[in-house]
Amino acid sequence: MRPPLNPSAWKWCAGAGTVLLALLTLHGGHCGTAPADFVAQYKAECHFPDGSERVRFLDRYFYNQEEFVYFDSDVGRYIPETEFGKPDADYWNNNPALLEQKKAEVERFCKHNYDVRKQDARSWKVIPKVRITPTKTMSLDHQTMLVCYVEDFYPPAINIIWIKNGKEETGSVMSTEMLQNGDWTYQIHLFLETTPERGDTYVCQVEHSSLKSPITVEWKPDSSESAKSKRLTGIVGFALGAIFITLRLIIYLKNKKGTPRIPVPQNDVA
C-alpha cells in the first residue's frame, strides 16, 4: 500500500518540460519521481444551496482527471472515491486537527469571501433579451405552439406571463427549468399552446429587477413567417400579372396603329 499524501503539500513543479500541478510529498517527503505523463489537480469549492445561509465546503483531489478523495464539510470527514484514495482518506480522518481545520474553511474561506463579494453580486444586474417564435407551421384556426425565449439575464429571479388579446393566459402555458449559461447569466423558455385567429394579439411580458418597467414583446398571426411568405407571394403574383397585362396592351395598341388601310372601291348604282 502506498503512503498517504500530505494535503498541504501541493505546489507547482516542472515535469517533462511542462509546468504541472504535482503532488510533492508522499507522507512528508519532497518532490518525488512522477510518470512521464500525469496531471494532479486540487479544487476547493464553496456551495450555497438555493441561496440559503447553509454553506457546503468541498476539498477535492484528482489524479489524471479522476477524483480519488475529497473532504465534505456536511459529513465532516474525507471520503474516498476510488481505491487509490482510500489510504489518504483513512490517514486524514485519523487526524482531528486536520479535520477541524477543514471544517473551519466554511467560515474562513467560503463565508468570508461570500461576504466580501455579496454586495457586488447583489448590485450586478443584466437585462433579459426577449423574443417570440412559433415552433409549428403557422396556420389560422390550427393549434400552434408559441415560445417566448427570455435569455441572458441576472439575477435569476424573474416573472414571465403570456397575454392574449389583453388577458393573461394560464391554462396552456408550460415552462422549462431555469437554465444556466455558464457566465452567471440565465435563460428560460415559456411555451403557449393556442389556436390563433385573424386579429389576435399575443404578448410575452417579462418583469425583472434590472428593468424599470416590464418588457413586452408582441406577436400576431399575420406577423409570422408563413403569413409574410403568403403575402409576398400574392404581391409578386399581382405584380407579374400587371406586367403581363401591360405588355399585352402595348402590343395590341402597336398592332392596331400599324395596320394599313386599304381603300375599297364603290360601285355606281344605275
Image: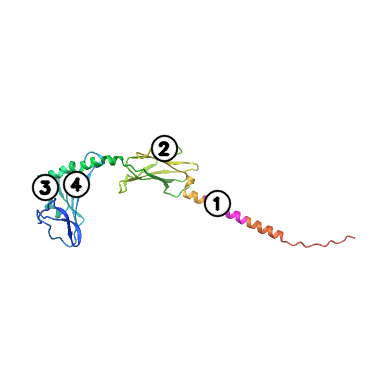
User: Within 10 Å of the Cα at label 2, are there few (<14), some (14-19), or many (20+) other Cα atoms?
Assistant: some
The magenta-colored residue range is 231-245
Q: Whole-percent x and y of residue 90?
A: 11, 50
Residue name at image x 20 percent, y 60 percent: 18
Residue at the spot of label 2: 168
Q: Look at the image and tell me in which quarter the C terminus lies.
A: bottom right
Whether tag 4 and tag 2 are in contact, CB under 8 A, the answer is: no
Question: The residue under label 3 is which amino acid type?
Answer: Asn
| In the displayed structure image, the side of residue 156 where residue 8 appears, left or right | left
Residue holding disc 1: 235
- Could you tell which of marks 2 and 3 lies nearer the N-terminus? 3
| Closer mark to the observer between disc 1 and disc 2 | 1
Tell me the amino acid under the disc marked 2: Glu
Query: Does any portion of residue 230 appear in the rendered image?
Result: yes
Q: Answer with mark 4 or mark 1, whichever residue precedes in sequence.
A: 4
Residue 23: numbered disc: none
**Depth check: 116 or 56 in front?**
116
Residue contact at pointers 1 and 3, CB within 8 angstroms: no
- Identify the mark at residue 93; answer none if there is no mark: 3
Give residue 253's quadrant in the image. Answer: bottom right
